[in-house]
Image (cartoon, helix red, strand yellow):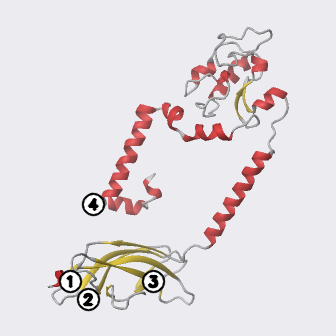
Amino acid sequence: NLMWYFVPPEDFFNYIQNPLEHKYLFIFWLGFTIALIAIVVFIKENFCIYMCPYSRVQSVLYDNDTIMTVYDYKRGGEVFDAKGIKLWKKPEALNAECTGCEACVKICPTHIDIRKGMQLECINCLECSDACTKVMGKLGKMTLISWTSPQSIEDRQKVRYMRFKTIGYIVAMVVVFSGLLMMGSKKEDMLLNINRQELYTIRDNGRVENSYVFLFQNTQKQAYDFYFEVQNNAEIQIKRPSKPFRIEAGEKSKQVVVLYTEANLAKDAQKDTHIPLEIRAYAVDSQEPIEVFRKSVFIYPPNKSLH
């Protein structure tokens, strides 16, 4: 599923049948597989404690008004001192409601004691809150662990949702979302991906050919005939395909493309010449312009290779 974000499923299953032609896909596929197996089987909750970036980010973004999993020490009693040293299993303060059952500790997937306060290892799964709810519910009391803020526990007021930091986050999200809308409104009329195949081929008459694979996708709502042209170099011609091809609405088409030149484009007698190409692909039978531009390269052999 992770690979399908980058390679469409229908292409993925075709590619894995030819591993030698798609080495990088197999390298990434194998890498992701090893990483996920290592995380699930061996690293487990240690990933959340030591490797997950969320815990590092939250320590920067959190403040006393941030909503999180919080233990109500005023009702339950303090179990740890200011230095984080555990005082006792069950609070001995007068009227402390915590029973010291440690159900919250036993169920925690990252093996922390939420009564100690906010910790980087906490993933806010609220398992401890559920466990405490069951225990305290049997005593006819509310849970000591809830989804609230430290400041709300401290002053017994409602959580302050609207404050400078949250307003800043909202503004930032609106700016980002607006940017995404603008980018989305300027989407291309069609899609084209160009991959070079072999280096080059020299024919008996001295003609030099380069092969490519063009992957077209018609993103329009109706079928069109598509073709392309080399815009920046009139000496490079199209050998294949020789005529436009039809692509249905929403469909893809893979075309083997051969470009050639009969002119001498070599600039060096010792090494290949890389000639920049600008490809314009377009819908032939559309009244409105449907086109995209892509850059590629045409490789021409050194002079000595032609003799």
Q: Are marks 2 and 3 in contact (CB under 8 Å)?
A: no
Q: Which mark is residue 280?
A: 3
Q: Residues within 10 Å of mark 4 (few under 14, many from 20)?
A: few
Quick one: label 1, few (<14), some, or many (20+) residues within 10 Å? Answer: some
Residue under label 1: 303
Residue at image location 84% in from the left, 28% down from the top: 155
The three-letter code of the residue at mark 2 reads: Asn
Separation of residues labelled 3 and 1 (CA atoms) = 29 Å
Q: Earlier in the sequence, mark 4 or mark 2?
A: 4
- Quarter placement of the C terminus: bottom left
Q: Where is residue 150 drawn, in percent x and y? A: 75, 30
* Residue placed under numbered mark 2 in the picture: 264
Task: Please tell me which of labels 4 and 1 falls first in the chain.
Answer: 4
Name the mark nearer the viewer: 2 or 3: 2
Marked residue nearer the N-terminal end (3 or 1): 3
Q: Label 2 neighbourhood size at 10 Å, few (<14), some (14-19), many (20+)?
A: some
Q: What is the secondary structure assignment of the residue under circle 3? A: strand
Q: Evaluate if marks 2 and 1 touch, with contact meaning CB atoms under 8 Å apart.
A: yes
Q: Are marks 3 and 4 in contact (CB under 8 Å)?
A: no
Q: Which residue is mark 4?
A: 18
- Residue 153 to residue 21: above or below: above
